[in-house]
Image (spheres, rainbow, N blue to C red):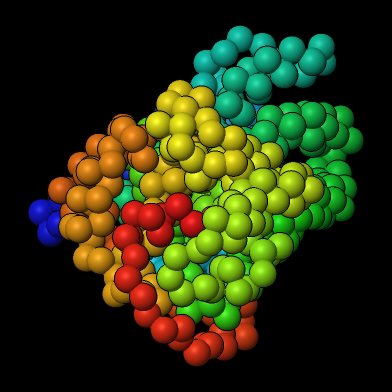
Amino acid sequence: MNQQRRNRNNTAFRAYYFGVLVTSIALLSYLAIYQKPVRTEWLAWGYYLVILLAADTKLTEIQARSRSKVLASRALAMSMLVLFGPFVAVVMDAISSLVRGVFLQHTTPRKMFFNMAMLAIANGVAGLVYQAIPFHASFSNGLFLLPLFATLLVYATINSLIVTGIMSLDLHIPVREIWHRDFSWGAVVGVLELPFIAIIILLFLHTGPWTLMLYLPIIWVVFAIIRAHEQQKEAHMASIAVLATTLEADEPYTHGHSYRVSQYAVTIGRAMGMSPRNLEVLEYGGLLHDIGKIAITNDIICKPGRLTDEEFATLAEHPAIGARIVEQIKFLPETVDLVRHHHERPDGKGYPDGLKGDEITLGSSIMNICDAFDAMTSDRSYRKALPVEMAIEELVKHRGTQFNAAVVDTVLALHRRGEFDIIPDSAVEKVIRQIQRVGEPPVRAIPTPTKEDPVHEVQR
Ligand SMILES: [Fe+2]
Ligand SMILES: [Fe+2]
């Protein structure tokens, strides 16, 4: 990313940050002046504070595992909005955020103030929406559920949009991708919270504030379920990454290949406007694309120089074998197509199915180009790595025959903007060490160099 673009992003980030802070202060002042508490019950406020802190302690644990910053304690915030009005809810949530930030998470002040401001805006606006909708005091016939549902949606949307916005500006990742990765699960949980919120409110009104303590085991169960889901997903991803990196660990010429292919593919997919789900498929498809090589003997995979027809036929089985392996994982089923078809070509001369043009999915076409790009820009036994310009020239030369034209154009445009370059070995090493946690992989003797056409190599 060039300097000018970075500066523009920094200014946008600061403007956004202070915009959120100023909005929250303005809203809080408005609420303090015009919104009196619906009921003043010091004991009930005390109970709420205890339970908010308890929920936040549990949340801190969950948030440390996932990248999600969804504050699922919104069930409590929602019930406070209904029972006490927006001003009390905003102040209580702010106190809880302050305690959490200072004593539990040891957050930087910058981050903590942003979180407090964000919660204040979400609580404040949601509370005003609740009071503006009819039936907001109809507790005896259950009609308060209608404004409550609308309020829940407003709260979850404002909360997530504010965080998504700041993360997008900070990480330079499109808003919808962050939403999908970090918030879609949280939004589902949010809607499911409606019955819980209703129960909290009704128990409070009919039996007394002490009933809030009954919520503690519910918090535990909800978060145990979320944690199980997160752990399952993490375990799947970790096994995929370990499979991919182990396969390449003792092969000096393909070391880190799958990781780089996966990263190049996500960059291209994002530039082509692919959906967040498809970007995830590209990421894991890239890690897995050559997994079928596990069934091919090393004397073929590592053979220096040109393969015999028979050897090539054996090697060409790896996409089909890989697809059969990935089918068994039953995780991101769309990756099967990418693994099977990453050596197909628009002119139909690829393998294993000889697909042509539109018969090849965009994902597989991206995979094919990233595979070729990485093969060309990595050292091989018979030649040194090509510089990025030459590799892109090769892609352009074979545009429409060996490589999908639209994908080649995207790579070219990205490169011209300075957004597509070779991933350095240092970055690959760091990630692989993180994945395997076993230090440096063994490096084997390098076979004798022989000359070979780099684009032919792409066909391996
Ligand atoms: Fe391959
Ligand atoms: Fe490959």
Image location of residue 24, percent across then percent down: 37, 42
Total of numbered circles in the picture? 0
Q: Identify the residue at image location x=46%, y=83%.
A: 447
Image location of residue 265, percent across then percent down: 42, 48
The answer to whether residue 221 is left or right of residue 391 is right
Q: Identify the residue at image location x=61%, y=49%.
A: 319
Q: Identify the residue at image location x=46%, y=46%.
A: 367
Quadrant in the rendering for residue 60: bottom right
The answer to whether residue 327 is left or right of residue 355 is right
* Residue at the left extreme, as displayed: 4
Quadrant in the rendering for residue 379: bottom left
Q: Can the viewer see residue 244? A: yes
Quadrant in the rendering for residue 156: top right
The answer to whether residue 25 is left or right of residue 44 is left
Q: Can the viewer see residue 67? A: no
Relative to the observer, which residue lies in front, 304 or 332? 304
Relative to the observer, which residue lies in front, 353 or 46? 353
Assign the N terminus to one quadrant of the image.
bottom left
The answer to whether residue 41 is left or right of residue 448 is right
Relative to the observer, which residue lies in front, 226 or 424? 424
Image location of residue 371, percent across then percent down: 43, 54
Image location of residue 200, percent across then percent down: 79, 36
Q: Tell me if residue 148 comes above or below residue 416 in the rendering.
A: above
Q: Tell me if residue 451 comes above or below residue 362 in the rendering.
A: below
Q: Tell me if residue 309 comes above or below residue 82 in the rendering.
A: below
Q: Identify the residue at image location x=74%, y=12%.
A: 143
Relative to the observer, which residue lies in front, 129 or 351? 351
Q: Tell me if residue 63 comes above or below residue 24 in the rendering.
A: below
